Image: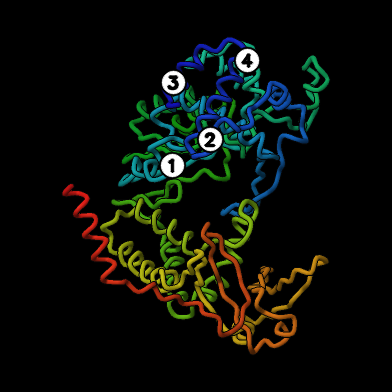
Amino acid sequence: MDKTQIAQIASQMSTREDLLALLNRIKQDEIRELGFDADKFYPFTMKHLLYYCNPNHVFHRYRQFKIKKKSGGFRQITAPRNQSFMMLLQTVNKILKAMYSPSDYAMGFTEERSVVTNASIHKGQNYVFNIDLKDFFPSVEQRRVLKRFGAKPFNFNPEIALLLSGLCSMRVKREQADETQTHDLDKEFVYVLPQGAPTSPIITNMICDTLDRRLAGLARRFGLRYSRYADDITFSSMHYVYAEKGEFRKELARIIGSQGFTINDTKTRLQKRGSRQEVTGIIVSDKLNVTKKYVREIRSLLYIWEKYGYSATMAKFLPKYKAEKGHVKKGNPDLANVLSGKLMYLKMVKGDSDSVYSNLYDKFQLLVAKDMGLGKTTPHGITYIETIPLLKFEKDKNTVVSVHQKEDGKRYATFELEDVKQVVSINKEVTMNGELQKENLAISNCKNPKGEQFWLIHSVDKVTVYKPKPIDIDELNNDLDSLINAQDG
């Protein structure tokens, strides 16, 4: 189903049965597009829908964890606890995206807009003024979401609006009981948007429509440029209007307060021309640029990979990656994919003709071709990225590889790479006695056909470089003749 079809059906919904039918139709179409048998999919049920739409069903809905902020401290993330609830919210999100388009000033969580789009608005200005909204997602209560679902472009009736707003909200204990509330639960708890649910980003854009309109009006009044990326608000100009007790700052605080948000004063900053002006992580001067640190990290990883090999690069890269991403991504990362993503971002900011980008990209392609080319891949799709004798590996990495055996007899090994524990598979051709003879063993950093990386211990003489099957010239000519004759016929 395309967006137009979804929006048309959604606009005609009048009962919760209509909503359930649309959710299942979207899910079934998506399964069909992925190439699976759409007749064998498991549909959402009414029992399923009614359970998850109640924020008081706390345990089976969301889990909470903390991630490190770049600026220090931690940010609490609340994510769906199970795949079933996640799929339900993702399907609801498709309905919302089909019906709603964010304001022209919203740069985050919006198709065809990005941090680069946001930063480009403020390029080449004398003054760049940034503010941050405190506790952005939890500041949006369910009652506001409910009211928004009843307005344009949704115009949902109260039953559907209540059901959807409940699905998209979570229960949070109040710091202090609110005795003005009628119900006991409402006195003790408040129902807000979770930071980490797939529906929260678009809903905050919906809620901020009025905020964007009023702040854009404020910007026009003072001759400024304005944009918002989620909770990150930026104004810029050639002239100065940003005095702390000036008219602009007073009116800005009034508008934000009237929309139920609070300015995080610790993150308010005025950046003047001549200093480093940054908007959503991108430097804005006469042209857009990334930080020197970002380029230095890519260049450093490529240098280590080229000079010391893939495993040494992983040892350098892995601890930082685990600290930053380990809460959401299990297992070892594919370093090549991570570097590819970093280079894509560099290209998006600086452009593909930029010499810094092109030089780094060319070096990356050479390293990938050397370590992950066809000659390193078996007929079964296993790529041997790098193979090192086991004793040399232990010495170079300052680690010890230990072999273990499970109750079912299966063997595996472990070691630590820069204080990060690694689990290693053992090739079935390695005998029990052979495990003790490390001088006869090697360890390989491998990648399976799905792109997942793993370690493998095998005999030191195992073939890990594969020669392509030689081409039979006579067979090739016969095949070409057959193709030509078939086309002539």
Residue annotated with mark 4? 17
Mark 4: which amino acid? Glu
Q: Earlier in the sequence, mark 2 or mark 3?
A: 3
Do residues under tags 1 and 3 come within 8 Å of each other at their CB atoms?
A: no
Q: Secondary structure at mark 2?
A: helix
Disc 3, SS:
helix
Q: Which residue is under mark 2?
A: 31
Q: Earlier in the sequence, mark 1 or mark 3?
A: 3
Q: Position of residue 32 (x, y in %)?
A: 50, 34
Q: In whole angstroms, how far apart are the C-alphas of marks 1 and 3? A: 42 Å
Dot 1 falls on a residue whose secondary structure is strand
Q: Residue at x 35, y 74 (%)?
A: 470
Q: Residues within 10 Å of mark 1 (few under 14, many from 20)?
A: many
Inspect this view and state whether residue 216 appears: yes
Residue carrying label 3: 5
**Mark in the foreground, 1 or 3:** 3
- Tell me the residue at 19%/49% (across/down): 487
**Of marks 2 and 4, which one's residue comes earlier in the chain?**
4
Give the residue at mark 1.
129
Mark 1 residue type: Phe
